[in-house]
Image: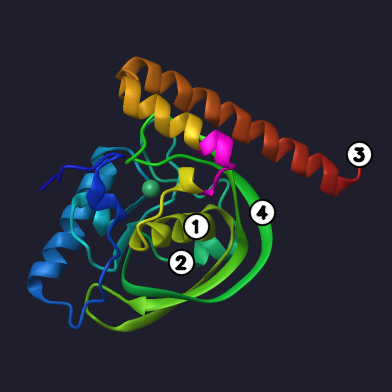
């Protein structure tokens, strides 16, 4: 079942998620509904507070697709490829976080906006899977960024809160005054963000090859 995604400034997005005691059948159903919702919205991650459930649960699938919509591994790091996706994590905890990186992030709860955010490049996280069993993720790449972005949601925090004060307020005021852009405008800004990300990636590759 596709669920409704709350959008900023919905106050429910500001509530902290509570740890689950046990992965009940109801929570399993919520997790599968969240995965369905994430795919329906072309997202790469979704946290329970985004669907109005103040619990510590996230779902993630950062695998890219080709033009026909097939899942591909191009662009995934070696560590990312070793992680089985989609991922369901209850009570996630980041245990190790190293180095810094930046990425132009977006969010299904702030549609149409993309801004560069600094995160840790490498993380190790643990939590419970959909069967309630403890598991670990060791990853870098987009998957590491996504885990950190989604975990922010469990603290009632959005990526636009991580921008400079001026930038953050500008976006929030604009949304509160004028609402969200049209689907066409959103698609345009998504394309622009994609192009800027590719540029940033190429620049990074040039820098590391010493050209
Ligand atoms: Zn988000």
What separation in Å lies between label 2 and label 1 (alpha carbons)? 9 Å
Q: Residue 155 or 74: which is nearer the viewer?
A: 155
Q: Which residue is mark 2?
A: 83
| Magenta residues, start to end | 162-168
Quadrant (top left/top right/bottom left/bottom right) for the C terminus? top right
In percent of width and height, residue 108 lies at: 33, 40
Left or right position of 53 against 25: right
Could you tell me which secondary element the residue under label 4 belongs to?
A: strand
Q: Earlier in the sequence, mark 2 or mark 1?
A: 2
Which dot, 2 or 4, sits closer to the camera? 4
Left or right position of 181 against 106: left
Q: Which residue is mark 1?
A: 143
What separation in Å lies between label 2 and label 3 (alpha carbons)? 32 Å
The stretch drawn in magenta includes residue 54 = no
Q: Is residue 86 visible?
A: no
Q: Which residue is mark 4?
A: 101
């Amino acid at each position: 079942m596709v669920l409704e995604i709350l959008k900023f400034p919905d106050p429910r997005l500001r509530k902290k998620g509570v740890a689950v005691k046990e992965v009940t059948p109801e929570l399993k159903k919520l997790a599968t509904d969240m995965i369905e919702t994430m795919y329906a919205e072309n997202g790469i991650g979704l946290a329970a507070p985004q669907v109005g459930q103040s619990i510590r649960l996230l779902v993630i699938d950062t695998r890219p697709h080709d033009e026909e919509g097939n899942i591909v591994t191009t662009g995934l790091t070696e560590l990312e490829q070793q992680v089985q996706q989609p991922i369901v994590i209850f009570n996630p905890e980041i245990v190790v976080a190293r180095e810094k990186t930046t990425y132009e992030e977006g969010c299904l709860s702030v549609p149409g906006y993309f801004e560069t955010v600094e995160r840790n490049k490498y993380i190790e996280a643990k939590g419970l899977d959909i069967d309630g069993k403890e598991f670990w993720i060791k990853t870098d790449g987009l998957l590491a960024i996504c885990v950190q972005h989604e975990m922010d949601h469990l603290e009632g925090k959005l990526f636009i809160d991580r921008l400079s004060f001026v930038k953050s307020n500008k976006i929030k005021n604009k949304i509160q005054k004028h609402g969200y852009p049209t689907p066409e405008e959103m698609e345009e800004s998504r394309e622009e963000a994609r192009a800027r990300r590719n540029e940033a990636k190429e620049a990074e590759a040039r820098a590391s090859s010493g050209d």
